[in-house]
Image (cartoon, rainbow, N blue to C red):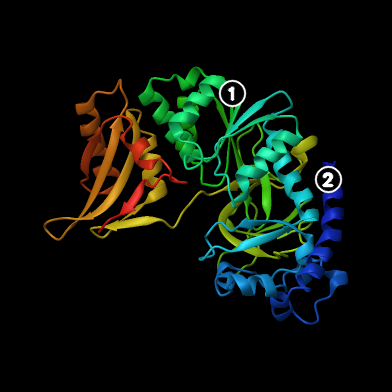
Amino acid sequence: MTLALPESQAEIDAVRRERMRAAAEAALRARIHRKRLPADLDLDRIHEPEEWRRIPVLDKEELRALSPRAFMTDFNIAPREDIQEYWRSGGSTGKPLFYPRTFRDMEFMFEGFRRGIHLAGVEAGDTAHISYPLGIHPVGHVSARVCQQMGVGVNWAGAGANTPSAAQVELIDQMQPTVWMGMPGYALHLANLAEAAGFDLKNSSVQKILCCAEPLSAAKRAKIESMWGATVFDGFGMTEMCMMGAEDDMHDGFRMWTDMFHLEVLDPESHEPVGPGEEGVLVSTALWNVNATPFIRWNSGDLVVWRSTEPEGDGYRVFPRLKHAHRTAGFFKVRGINVTHGDFEDFMFAMAGVQDFKCEALAGPDALDVLRVSYEARKEADAGALAAELSEKIRNTFELRPELVQLDLGTLAREFEGAVKAPRFQDNR
């Protein structure tokens, strides 16, 4: 283990005090940060809130302004011989960038992932079927490598583009893994495909599901757990940092590794700290993995709220809990009405008779936009009653009369095959 778990808040504070200076010193080695940071920044007082907040918040617009070549010369501080691998950005910065990770950085990257897997109760003797995409995005291959380091067996399946989903369902049946890891949307995709194929996934060997990389709402969690018959543990991370936190058995926010990352919850406009229990934007600083890309006061755009800020026990409970708002800017405007993707997804997954769905905004023949909802009904559902219920509840909830299309079971599983994230919302006007 690279870092032992801290035993108290005082120990976390001591580590943070030391490493905030190291993070600032690393940042000052990068050309872009030398232009951004105050020339008279007092490193001896950098751990003090007033001095720390003199460092400007780094946002995505600043990264979007850099070409990949400029990123490597102006942001990266590692010589080529120190670089172990490159991680692809999540794409939210516009054109994807590739973040170098040094051999030293990777020790801490592995530790962040190891903690999340261990916190879910995964241990030596378990077998994990990993359905994260395998490639230059890190979550899949790092999860697999860390599992192996922990003595956990691994089936490196990858997403549907790596191993066809139908084959993955067969592998789960044949290999009897105890853990499944992947994006929440793909968990639903495999569950829908399994049901269409007549495979009883609910009574399979899988006991735990570890997810991250996309929002997991309460409705989506409940649907996944119902279809898989397994307990879902969510994780929180970003390519700019690492795996930063994960759920324990409370399932009420992420235990955040505050000995590895300095975390601030700020007002989105003023960048001033918000009060306890208030929602704000997450601003993160890596404290250890700073040997190539010193992300300091990085605004990822995630809206969060602290669930707890003081230790709640021993072990991982020394870490505070952070709740993600899981709100997204994605929405349709149909006939002047905003239909937020996250709200509509929660609504559909809460409908007991709905197996899966997609939602399209279309241009209608009368020059008025149409909200088309294509859905699959569960085998036991009354098709006529479900259609009537959907029509009424969508109209009452979203103030729009939908065009409903019932699809055969398995249609959307085939359509979504190969997509990293299921394209459930499409603007086809």
The residue at which mark 1 appears reads as: 207
Q: Residue at x 70, y 35 (%)?
A: 147
Q: Between marks 1 and 2, how big is the CA–CA gap? A: 29 Å
Closer to the camera, 347 or 4?
4
Q: Where is residue 207 in the image (x, y as percent from the top left)?
A: 59, 23
- Location of residue 350 with respect to 321 vertically, above or below: above
Q: What element carries label 2?
A: loop
Q: Nearer the viewer, residue 299 or 291?
A: 291
Instruction: Where is residue 38? Give x, y as percent.
Output: 75, 80
Crowding at mark 2 (Cα within 10 Å: few <14, some 14-19, many 20+): few
The vertical placement of 34 against 383, above or below, is below
Q: Nearer the viewer, residue 221 or 177?
A: 177
Q: Split into 4 quadrants, where in the image is the N terminus?
A: top right
For residue 353, side relative to residue 296 (left or right): left
Q: Which comes before the other along the chain, label 1 or label 2?
A: 2
Q: Which amino acid does label 2 sit on?
A: Leu
Q: Which amino acid does label 1 sit on?
A: Gln
Position of the C terminus, as image quadrant, is bottom left
Quadrant of residue 25 within the rendered picture: bottom right
Residue 119 picture quarter: top right
Farthest left residue? 366
Q: Is residue 143 left or right of residue 203?
A: right
User: Which residue is at a point 20% across and 46% down the rendered structure image?
Assistant: 401
Vertical placement of residue 156 versus 206, above or below = below
User: For mark 2, what is the residue?
Assistant: 3
Rendered residue at 83%/64% (across/down): 22
